[in-house]
Image (cartoon, rainbow, N blue to C red):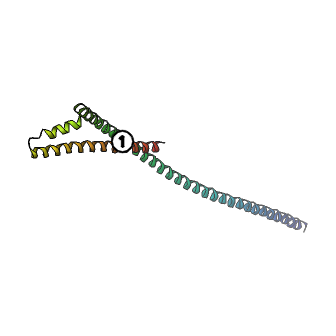
Amino acid sequence: MNVFASNISDMEKQKQGITEQRSSVEKGIETKQSELNQIESDTASVKATLERVSKEINETNAKLKQQVEKVNSEQKQIQKLKQEIAVLKEEIKQRQKVLEKRARAIQTSGSGKSYLTILMQAEDFSDFIDRANLVQVIVKSDQEIMEKQKSDQKLLNDKQTASEKKVG
């Protein structure tokens, strides 16, 4: 019976050892499961943060693209203004030359006298009317040139101011 008792006692000890091992393994499994749950939670948190940051980057890139397009548009407008300014300056310069020639011609011929001379050289009343119309056309043309010169000079100043504002 001793042998039996000894076997039973050994078996009980074995059983207890196995139970302790099982308990230890179960605790290990619980610990690992808890760690796995924490890792999954951390992974989900990192994934959410990554998605948020990615969305912010996309939004920032879209805003940057809009700003680049706006800058390009402004640069095109500035370039167009510069071209318009150059054209206006040339037109003003050419018109100024015409005005200077007209002023010299008027000064050397004495405009009031030359207009009067033109009218007085009429051979008859019909010729006088034709000459009066001609003088009127010349005077009107001179006035239109002066008005256009003033208008273009103002437009030039406005465009230069607009260009400076866009550049600045």
Which residue is depicted at the point 24% across and 30% down?
108
Q: Is residue 51 left or right of residue 153?
A: right
Which residue is depicted at the point 55% across and 56% down?
55
Q: Nearer the viewer, residue 156 or 121?
A: 121
Give the structural element (helix, strand or loop) at label 1: helix
Q: Quadrant of residue 56?
A: bottom right
Locate the N terminus and report the quarter of the image it occupies.
Answer: bottom right
Q: Is residue 125 left or right of residue 166?
A: left
Residue type beneath disc 1:
Gln
Q: Residue furthest top?
A: 108
Q: Image height check: is 157 above or below 50?
A: above
Which residue is depicted at the point 61% across and 56% down?
49
Question: Disc 1 designates what residue?
Answer: 153
Q: Residue furthest right?
A: 2
Q: Nearer the viewer, residue 114 or 45?
A: 114
Which residue is depicted at the point 36% across and 42% down?
153
Q: Is residue 97 left or right of residue 24?
A: left
Query: What percent of the width, then of the height, locates residue 118?
Result: 16, 38
Query: What percent of the width, then of the height, locates residue 64?
Result: 50, 49
Query: What percent of the width, then of the height, locates residue 42?
Result: 66, 57
Q: Quadrant of residue 154?
A: top left
Q: Image height check: is 90 above or below 54?
A: above
